[in-house]
Amino acid sequence: MSTPAVSRDPEVSPDDEVIGEAVAPPPLPDEDEATKAARAFKFPCAGCGADLAFDPREQRPKCPYCGHIGEAPKGGPAVVERDLAAALSKAAERRAEVARTTDLKEVRCENCGANVQFAGALTAQRCPYCGQSMAREGVHESTQRLAVDGVVPFQIDKTKAGANLAAWVRSRWFLPSKLAHGGISASFQGVYLPFFTFDALTANRYTGLRGEYYWVTVGSGKNQRRVRRTRWYPAAGSFRRFFDDVLEGAGSGLPDDELAKLEPWPLKELKPFAPEYLAGYLARTYERSLPDCFHGAKGQMEAGIESEVRRRIGGDTQRVFSIDTDWSALTYKHVLLPVWMATYRWNQKTYRVVVNAATGEVQGERPWSWLKILLLVLAILLGVLAIVGIAGASGALR
């Protein structure tokens, strides 16, 4: 796959010098690469019959009632990279199936008989009437959907997530005093969110100009001044860059900027998918299509390539005329990553906080104390006025 050359920053000021001629870089080659799997999750305790839940400390399913520890999750031999080109060619076939499996579904609770609705891409939840774990059967098994390849298991438990949240609250500036001293009272819900990761080998050719600043004196008398000019030199070259595990969120629950703040994720700790990891947690299937996610990831890679081009051109500033990229060895993985989510209310408004359940990173929404901000602004203004007053007084004494 080749991206046509694109033009960037072509304008050069007529006051600037262009020295020499650009030399076209040599051509570079092409290439490509490998497919899907998944399941459903509910595990009765061998001790008391209650549902097991995956325990972040034990890294095994554990009964929250009698403490019985289940068997360690057994996934496949390894998390595999899948052929992106093959998957993209089938994307159109899947659209109808994605629409079908993300409609509102009604599931009968086996424990109390209540009918529970599953909306959107939610595939696991607890019965709101009796607390029984429920799964919308078949969604993670569907052969029409892309398989879950890997899971980063929960490693931060609810207690640790609460402690991290308390520390995060204490570190926020300009919180309302009551909230700062009393802390946030929030109930956490563990959720696995869907992501795609992408790998690509890129072969890049570029042309442009390297700019080096110099100064000249213009005008005369009172109008004389120093002006910065730029001396431009032609630049061209080629390089390869491999992108590994470029991450793109595949759900619609959290905004991209909020997800980005939870990074980095320990993707080296990905485990082959096993349903035991999902026991006791909510799990969402992907809502953004593979082509859509690849488009987003490709944008991240292109930004990285342009940054590398500018670094290679060097100088004080750069003009990039064209970047021509050949894409090969394109692969993807469908992965689930763990978060603790909570909401809290303050002054009739709801705020959301999210904890990366693999690293403990906390991000979220918070209220502001406008009174504290106003007092700080007033203090700064008074300080400036005091300095001006002292300066004026010392000038008068002279």
Image: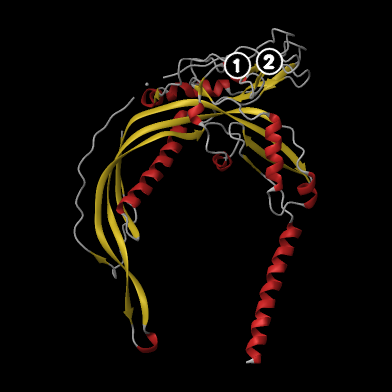
Residue 21 image-quadrant placement: bottom left
Name the foreground residue: 242 vs 101.
Answer: 242
Badges 2 and 1: C-beta atoms under 8 Å apart? yes
* Residue 238: x %, y % from top left: 26, 44
With 89 as the anchor, is 363 left or right in this view? right
Question: Which residue shows up at 72% across the image and 49% down it?
Answer: 367
Amino acid, disc 2: Leu
Residue drawn where x is 68% and y is 77% of the image = 385
Percent coordinates x, y for residue 308 in the rendering:
35, 47
Residue under numbered circle 2: 52
The residues bearing labels 2 and 1 have C-alpha atoms spaced at a distance of 9 Å
Q: Where is residue 166, by image quadrant?
A: top right
Q: Is residue 228 above or below residue 190?
A: below
- Residue drawn 71% across the image and 54% down it: 174
Question: Would residue 143 appear left or right of 310 to someone viewing this image?
Answer: right
Assign a secondary structure to mark 2. Answer: loop
Q: Which residue is mark 1?
A: 276
Q: Quadrant of residue 140?
A: top right
User: Mark 2 or mark 1, which has the lower sequence index?
Assistant: 2
Q: Nearer the viewer, residue 243 or 104?
A: 243
Residue 71 in the image: above or below residue 95: above
